Every structure is written in C-alpha cells, then in structure tokens.
Amino acid sequence: MPVLEFDLPDRFVAGTVGPPGQRTFFLQASAGSRLTSVSLEKQQVSTLADRINDLLDDFAGGEASDAVGEMIEDIAPLDTPIEDEFRVGTMSIGWDAERRVVILECHDGQEEVEVDEEGEPTLEPERPGEFETVLRVVLVPSQARAFARRCVKVVTAGRPPCPFCGGPLDPTGHVCPRANGYKR
C-alpha cells in the first residue's frame, strides 16, 4: 500500500478549482519540492472541518485556540500544477497524545479490483485494498485549526442558499420546491 506521508508539512490546505456550482474540491499537502493533491467531495471537506474542530476542542486545549489558528491563516490559492493523485473515498483523523499532533489519513476510493467472467470482484479476503493509496498528514494543533477554518471558508464560498428551501441558487435562478416548482 503506497503511503504519501507529510509529517508536519510546510503547507496543508483545502481549495477548489472551477466556478461555483461546478467546483472540484482538493486537499493539497506540500513539503519542500514535494506536492500532493487529492480530490474529494464538498461534504467531505465540511465534515472534515467539523471533526477536526471537535477533536481539537476535546484534546488540544489552548494549543489550538482560535487566536493561534488565526495567526497562521493561509489564504493563498492552491499550488500548481493541480493534478490529483486519487479521489478520496474514506478519511480518518486521530490524536497522537504522545506527540500532541493530529493525524489525518485520506484513503483512495478508487480501488483497482479484478473481476471474473461474470463481473464479480476477485479481491482476495486476506489482501483487501492492496492497491489502496493513502495520504497521511501530521499537523500540530494550530495548523489543524487553521486548516479547519479554511475548509469552512472554502465550503461556504460557493453558491448562496435559497432563502426559501436552502438549496443552492444558480446565477440563473433555480426551481424551488417551496414555490411549487416555479423558478426563483
């Protein structure tokens, strides 16, 4: 299993490419000349921010205070070239109490699975996910808090919500279920 590891990276951010409504979301880690980007869903970015904030509130205390996180806020765009290594399927976060760091893992959601003549997967049970790639990032609490704050900004920078149904508004309007299908 290939592991793309960034232990205390120079930079770890969430960002997007494309106009609102057609954005592709990325996580990007860099250390020196190494740059790794992975793509994921908007909801995954939002959930990741929530879970990191919860974890920091529970375990990091003052090390991850909002004041510390604001000092290292990163508002720069994603580094280029933006080529995703893989599309994120599952993620996990954890707290290393000994080192006092947050560990984030993003697992490849596009496993290569061989199929037999009937189209059934032939992945052997004793070797599940042998082709899975993992991005592992280790962050100090202040970096993690700043990352979570940027995730929230990236997610909310999209299309504004409809005041009636909460669905995203396109620049041309949208068919609103609360207006009996009329365009707003």
Image (cartoon, rainbow, N blue to C red):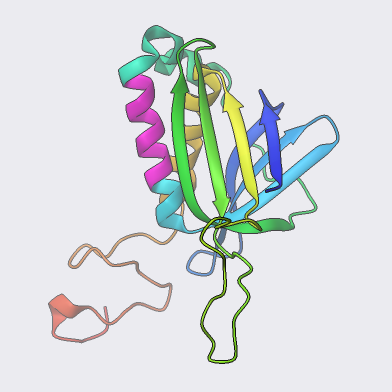
Q: On the image, which quarter does residue 161 sit in?
A: bottom left
Does the magenta-highlighted stretch encompass residue 51? yes
Q: How far across and how far down the image is residue 149, in percent?
A: 45, 33
Does the magenta-highlighted stretch encompass residue 127? no
Quadrant placement of the C terminus: bottom left
* Count of numbered circles on the image: 0
Q: Nearer the viewer, residue 7 or 11?
A: 7
Q: Residue, x 55% and y 18% (percent of image)?
A: 140
Q: Residue, x 32% and y 20% (percent of image)?
A: 57
Query: Is 173 on the left-hand or right-hand side of 136?
Result: left
Residue 74 visible, this angle: no
Q: Nearer the viewer, residue 117 or 18?
A: 117
Q: Nearer the viewer, residue 165 or 97?
A: 97
Q: Residue, x 54% and y 87% (percent of image)?
A: 119
Residue 79 visible, this angle: yes
Q: Residue furthest bottom?
A: 118
Specify the principal SS of the magenta part: helix
Query: Is 101 on the left-hand or right-hand side of 50?
Result: right
User: Is 65 situated above or below 180?
Assistant: above
Q: Residue, x 55% and y 16% (percent of image)?
A: 71
User: Is 73 situated above or below 83?
Assistant: above
Q: How far across and how far down the image is residue 60, in percent?
A: 40, 14
State which region is magenta. Answer: 47-57
Q: Nearer the viewer, residue 89 or 163?
A: 89
Query: Is 94 on the left-hand or right-hand side of 29?
Result: left
Q: How far across and how far down the image is residue 160, in percent?
A: 36, 59
Q: How far across and how far down the image is residue 3, in percent?
A: 69, 42
